[in-house]
Amino acid sequence: MIENDEQAKNAIIENIEMYNKSEDAKKLLTIILRLCEKYSFVENQTYPRPSHPIKEKREDPYYTLIAIILSLRTTLENETKAVRSFIGKYKSISEVLNADENEMIGVIKVAGMPQKKAQTIIKLSEYIQKYYNGNIWNAKKESVSKTREELLKMPGVGDKSADCMLELGFDMPSMVVDINVFRVASRIFGEKWAENPNFTNKEQIKAVKDRLENSLPRDYLTYQIAHTMILLQGKHICKSKCKCENCFITDCCNFYKEKNKSDDKNKKYEQLELTDFIDECR
């Protein structure tokens, strides 16, 4: 469990020193380490979960799954308010099962689509009660693939929600590819669709997910850190309209290099040894 940003950075440093699977791996881990210097891991963990770095936000993974449902098609601010209200009102799955639907709609209204989300939460809770005796931990199996199968059977749980639950709720290595991660990774790796990434294209999403997972150690902490850092880069810099002039990883970005073949302003990193950069970060 990571409890501060220094631990997050050190976890990546250890992986860089020990993990030499491919050039993709070295590049990606170097990028993540550099992003750890820019962004806070701890301050950007939104979903409550058992291994949350902030003690007050450590909750049973049942609430992680509820938070994932509430986060759909809403802002981070409204998601946070709705999750806080839900946890404050319903202290257990039993209380959710005995809840009045209209009352729940009021509790989570700020998250948007309250009726649909309330109905999904109730159906989901009934499913967990029926098939896992009310304990979502019973859905966690010995492998990522088998646990995913269990999650995808649940009402309201799709591919992305399952990945979120695996990576955050169950601390299992399954990379979450949201729209920000998809866009940034497509550009870093120089995928053929990097100019116009299509988040509705499942083949493109799977290709990015596979490449990320094949470039990282199969370690849930590394996945959590990588996902957070790449997501933040997408939110702040690598938007739909790139802010390359403000970016500090252009030297590692195949999309940027292709678009700026004659631009020498970032050459300072080209001869930098990986171990030198690690030393800079220590």
Image: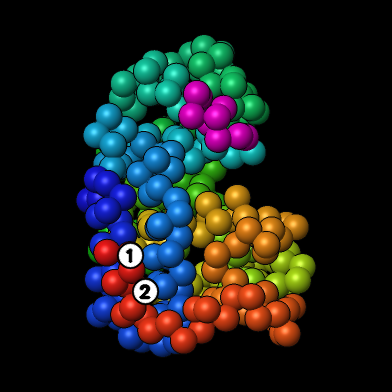
Query: Residue 10 appears at what percent x and percent y?
Result: 26, 62
> Is there any visible trace of residue 131 in the rendered image?
no
| Residue at image point 31% right, 24% down | 92
| Rendered position, 275 above or below 233 | below
Q: Quadrant of residue 144?
A: bottom left
| Residue at image point 38% right, 84% down | 273
Q: Is residue 78 magenta?
A: yes
Query: Residue 52 appears at what percent x and percent y?
Result: 30, 42
**Which range of residues does the magenta coloring cover?**
74-82
| Front in this rendered view, residue 210 or 249 | 249
Q: Indicate the secondary structure of the residue bearing disc 2.
A: helix
| Front in this rendered view, residue 161 or 179 | 179
Q: Quadrant of residue 195?
A: bottom right
| Mark 2 → mark 1, Cα distance in angstroms | 6 Å
Find disc 2 in the rendering and name its residue: 277
Query: In the shown orientation, is residue 233 left or right of residue 201?
Result: left
Proximity of marks 2 and 1: CB atoms separated by less than 8 Å: yes
Using the image, tell me which numbered label, if any, was put on residue 164: none
| Front in this rendered view, residue 219 or 280 | 280
Label the magenta part by its dominant secondary structure.
helix
Query: How many other residues sit within 10 Å of disc 2, few (<14), some (14-19) or many (≥20)?
Result: some
- What's under tag 1, amino acid-wise? Cys
| Rendered position, 244 above or below 188 | above
The image's colour scheme reads rainbow
- What's under tag 2, amino acid-wise? Phe
Query: Residue 224 appears at what percent x and percent y?
Result: 38, 56
Q: Quadrant of residue 282?
A: bottom left
Using the image, tell me which numbered label, if any, was put on residue 281: 1
